[in-house]
Image (cartoon, rainbow, N blue to C red):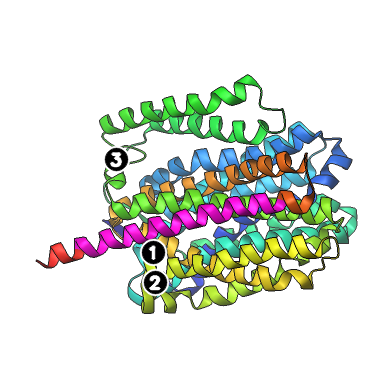
């Protein structure tokens, strides 16, 4: 089991510090989208270089997450959380000061690494420090922060670029992180308890290296393949990733302290959680990307107006997320998950109908009904993600379990825009923006229907196990 060292139990000030630390890295996934055109003009970046600006952050974030979780188990989660926040703040400063594309790319890699050090400590600390109703509420809030972060990134990024404060332009989307990071560095030692695993597991560097290669292959292929016309190396990399995945599984089975413990894959809740992360967050990242692209490139909206188009989605998401714990207690996580999909899928269908019937006379207000439904459904789904996935994970594996989930989540968020963007671009080349967006949203609806079927099967297995246990 994990234990708390020297510090009192986690209270609400510490919880808020941890949630702020969760918000920052996830905002940077979406805030960059509305600044890419300004970066291109200022630094002379090509389209491929802009893709890399987005991709390298996701790659560094995803490949370092599992190792970050293990380091937190070994060295202390609060300590790694503080180190991660400090590195993220320094990297954000370097991004804001970048004078060319290579400098920006290097700083984005450091940003991803800093995020990977901090994020696993947040969920693990919450998981081992809280109990009962407070645990349920805070885990729901933790999941909700991930959704709100995407909306904040779109809206805030558009406003910052449009306001051009002190002539900083796109640089302000990175520099705004600095005061928040400094506040976290001041508050974390005061209010966040120090926890670690009792047995201080060793570092699985071989597993970490293989995992880094796997995710790098997948993210590079999906990010750069569509841009470069799918050259041979981009087609081969996913096959290489499969072979490396087999090698990783063989290595982890023999490791005394595996980075991704095979025993966690034996948990039905964890397997379903990983599938949920892959399909839902991949679709979510793709949804945000293609919708923002349609609004800006298709309709010619300014960055600020494009960001405002997500306000209804974000507001409804936030309001529903506040009550997600109550809904979960009443219905249970599986039924709540199905309900979330039952709300989101009609919202996606309504969004398709809106773009097909009203194009090009589409305003921010005409998007409100559809995006509000999507936001409500997403909030319920996200609120179930960690409740379901961590249901059977022992405290001794809290760091490794949270790292596995976060790695899949961030990998899916990185792959989603590339996959959906490729489908979008292929359809756009032979059609219109409404047709391209409709195809991408239909792909998302298909993924959500598949998740509903998997959720029903998972719920049936849980109920059968409970009946067998009861005799």
Residue at screen point 69% across, 39% down: 107
Q: Residue furthest left?
A: 471
The answer for how far apart the CA atoms under marks 3 and 2 are is 26 Å
| Residue marked by disc 2 | 136
- Is residue 447 found inside the magenta-colored segment of the image? yes
Viewer-nearest residue: 134 or 344: 344
Q: Is residue 122 above or below residue 335?
A: above
Given this view, does label 1 or label 2 mark the residue nearer the observer? 1
Secondary structure, magenta segment, majority class: helix
Q: Quadrant of residue 455?
A: bottom left
Residue at screen point 46% across, 64% down: 192
Lateral position of residue 8 relative to residue 378, left or right? left
SS state under label 1: helix
Q: Which mark is residue 262?
A: 3
Q: Is residue 252 above or below residue 468?
A: above
| Residue marked by disc 1 | 387
Q: Residues within 10 Å of mark 2 (few under 14, many from 20)?
A: many
Q: Where does the magenta region start and end?
A: 437-465
């Amino acid at each position: 089991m994990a234990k708390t060292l020297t510090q009192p139990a986690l209270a609400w000030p510490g919880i808020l510090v941890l949630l702020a630390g969760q918000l920052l890295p996830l905002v940077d996934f979406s805030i960059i989208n509305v600044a890419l055109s300004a970066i291109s003009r200022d630094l002379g970046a090509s389209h491929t270089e802009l893709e890399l600006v987005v991709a390298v952050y996701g790659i560094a974030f995803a490949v370092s997450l599992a190792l970050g979780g293990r380091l937190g188990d070994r060295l202390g989660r609060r300590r790694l959380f503080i180190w991660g926040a400090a590195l993220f703040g320094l990297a954000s400063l370097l991004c804001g000061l970048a004078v060319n594309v290579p400098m920006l790319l290097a700083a984005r890699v450091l940003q991803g690494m800093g995020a990977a050090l901090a994020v696993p400590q947040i969920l693990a600390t919450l998981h081992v420090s809280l109990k009962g109703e407070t645990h349920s509420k805070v885990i729901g809030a933790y999941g909700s922060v991930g959704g709100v972060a995407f909306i904040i990134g779109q809206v805030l990024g558009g406003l910052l670029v449009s306001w051009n404060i002190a002539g900083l332009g796109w640089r302000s989307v990175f520099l705004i992180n600095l005061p928040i990071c400094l506040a976290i560095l001041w508050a974390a030692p005061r209010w966040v308890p120090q926890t670690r695993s009792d047995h201080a597991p060793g570092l699985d560097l071989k597993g970490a290296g293989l995992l880094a290669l796997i995710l790098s292959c997948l993210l590079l292929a999906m990010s750069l393949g569509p841009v470069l016309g799918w050259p041979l190396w981009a087609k081969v990399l996913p096959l290489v990733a499969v072979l490396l995945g087999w090698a990783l599984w063989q290595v982890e089975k023999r490791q005394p302290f595996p980075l991704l413990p095979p025993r966690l894959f034996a948990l039905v809740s964890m397997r379903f959680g990983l599938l949920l992360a892959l399909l839902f967050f991949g679709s979510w990242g793709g949804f945000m990307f293609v919708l923002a692209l349609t609004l800006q490139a298709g309709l010619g909206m300014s960055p600020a107006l494009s960001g405002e188009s997500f306000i209804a989605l974000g507001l409804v998401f936030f309001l529903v997320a506040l009550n997600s714990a109550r809904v979960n207690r009443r219905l249970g996580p599986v039924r709540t998950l199905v309900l979330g999909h039952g709300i989101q899928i009609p919202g996606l269908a309504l969004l398709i109908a809106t773009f097909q019937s009203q194009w090009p006379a589409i305003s921010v207000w005409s998007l409100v009904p559809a995006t509000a439904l999507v936001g409500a459904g997403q909030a319920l789904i996200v609120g179930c993600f960690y409740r379901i996935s961590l249901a059977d994970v022992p405290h001794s594996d809290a760091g490794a379990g949270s790292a596995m989930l976060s790695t899949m989540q961030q990998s899916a968020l990185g792959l989603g825009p590339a996959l959906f963007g490729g489908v979008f671009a292929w359809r756009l080349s032979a059609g219109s923006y409404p047709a391209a967006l409709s195809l991408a949203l239909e792909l998302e609806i298909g993924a959500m229907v598949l998740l509903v079927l998997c959720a029903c099967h998972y719920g049936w297995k849980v109920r059968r196990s409970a009946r067998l246990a009861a005799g």
